[in-house]
Amino acid sequence: MADESKPKAPSDNAQAASSVQNGTPAETNAVDAEVSGDEEGEEEDQAAADTGTTASAPKKKKKKAGGKKKKAAAAAAAAAGSTDSTADNVHSPESMRKPVPAQDIQGLLQQLALSQPNANGPKEGKAPEEYKFWNTQPVPKFKEPNLLQNTSEGEGEAQKEGPILPNAVCKASVKPEPEKLVDGFEWCLVDLDDKAELQELYDLLYNHYVEDTDGSFRFNYSVELLAWALKPPGWKREWHIGVRTKPTAEGKKGKLVAFIAGVPVSLRVRQAKVESVEINFLTIHRKLRSKRLAPVLIKEVTRRCYQNDIYQALYTGGVLLPTPVSTCRYFHRSLDWEHLYKMGFSHMPAGSSEMRQKLKYKLEHTTSTKGLRLMKKEDVPAVRELLTKYLERFQLRQEFTEEEIEHLMCSEQSKGVVWSYVVEQDGGKITDFISYYLLESTVLKNARHETIRAAYLYYYASDTAFQTPSNKKSASAIQTALSVRLQELVHDVLILAKKDNFHVFNALTLLDNPLFLKEQKFEPGDGKLHFYLFNWRTALLPEEGTKNNNNNNNNKKKKKKKKKKKKKKKKKKKKKKKKKKKKKKKKKKKKKKKRKRKKKTGFAPKREKLACV
């Protein structure tokens, strides 16, 4: 069980795979990297040493010293889709310049082979058999067709969608006590109502959560965001699980070195309603990542969920694990390009200049949507009704109560974390809703440790999607109208985020996002977000928005084909006309010649066959 890429409120996850929405890249990556790398950390380190190139061989001591730094950034590297470290060594300038001894040719060839993607296996992550921990869990395996759980390793008929393990089996497997930890550590509950413990959690995440590949940026989850994301309606204190060092003196707490959290969510997976838990913020102190703590934490939160009769979970991550039900990609829209460029977040395109980049991302000072305003508590019933109806169009979604909508969108806890807007018509009807949340990143390679304020697109809905096709209005016309409406809303939200001093606006390829990403100058990033369901069997879900996007693409293709056909017809007609004109000209020329000859000789010459003598 892992998590998503946003500050993880229950809503984020539920929205992204089909109606489950943006999460913070930080969380998702941390869970994956630590679960996939934690369990075999020492083995992987040894394997990396064995496959080193000759150029790097003399530097073995240095490599060991720097190994921890590489591990610290492993989560972000995986989330960003970075290549294997062995491949980096092979193609490094040092390895290219230095000669390779003959005895190491075989090792170099093996390393080059390892650096190539395997066409027969998963394109990311490890080989299926190497996921030792996940192969013991009730999750679909890579070899199983259509992501359906089979007992015959991919052969035979797939089973029906639903729980992989029956509830009775899960309940019977519950142990009364948690698994024992290694000496020097003990289980604890993190009390988020205690400011001191909440600050401890903040410090743990700030220092040991996800970084980018080269350690330049790290997510900075504010105390307010943590309280908002981890204390939704119905939250359980026993699902905020920590690991501490044992105290050295009586009356003192040990240091918090690991954490995992769960919050209750009601999901709709296609037609089935699934009461589940969203797993989030799996974090382990970087010095303890070879202690196999991640699987232990996941087993413990699973045990506690089983005790509460919750047998399914939703989690997300940037690393490929067995097996995603859907995958989305991150897109970024610059709001303050100059700041992003100075912080090393954005690059200068070839042939461009700072002035051109600023003009490219320039926004108006005022919004254009009539009736757009901040959401109030009085809007909660109307927003819930609108959002619920809108999300019914997707195959994986979270179902919200009014209490949850209020907490997530316009409560005291959401202030400074989430910005929610509605469009109110003259009659008082709410026709549109849109929101985004704040997640800062700290710039590590900067003396002042400046921050990048990133806005993540959250939930939105528009009644434009509810128009029914008729003789006059086709489904494609309604889709076009929805695209236009969403572009107007998102463009206004970009203006508002810019006014609130955000530097970049992020979105995933889920919901109807593909309808406006390109037009609003969002650009694809390196990060992907995989969505997973624990103990639930279901066929692969399409990337959210792809259905609408595919319809648009199909419509565009049809239009292009029609245009091509029309062009071909026009060309043929032109050719025929030209031929006719040429023929007419030739006939006219012949007639003129005949007339001239008649005038000279008085008769028209006839062609006669010569007789052979």
Image (cartoon, helix red, strand yellow):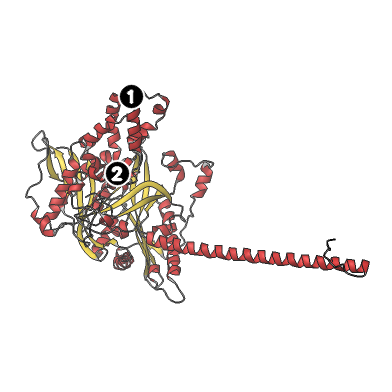
From the viewer's side, name the closer residue of 184 and 576: 576
Point out the residue furthest to the bottom here.
Answer: 471
The residue that label 1 is drawn on is 103
Does residue 448 appear anywhere in the picture? yes
Q: Quadrant of residue 79?
A: top left
Q: Residue drawn 20% across and 47% down?
A: 135
401 left or right of 591 in image? left
Q: Quadrant of residue 76?
A: top left
From the viewer's side, name the closer residue of 468 and 216: 468
Q: Nearer the viewer, mark 1 or mark 2?
A: 1
Point out the residue furthest to the front here.
Answer: 613
Q: Is residue 385 above or below residue 63?
A: below
Q: Position of residue 361 (x, y in %)?
A: 48, 50
The residue that label 2 is drawn on is 125
183 left or right of 489 in image? left
Q: Position of residue 444 (x, y in %)?
A: 34, 36
| Amino acid type, label 1 | Gln
Does residue 412 appear anywhere in the picture? no
| Amino acid type, label 2 | Gly
Q: CA distance from mark 1 to mark 2?
A: 30 Å
Q: Position of residue 168 (x, y in %)?
A: 10, 59
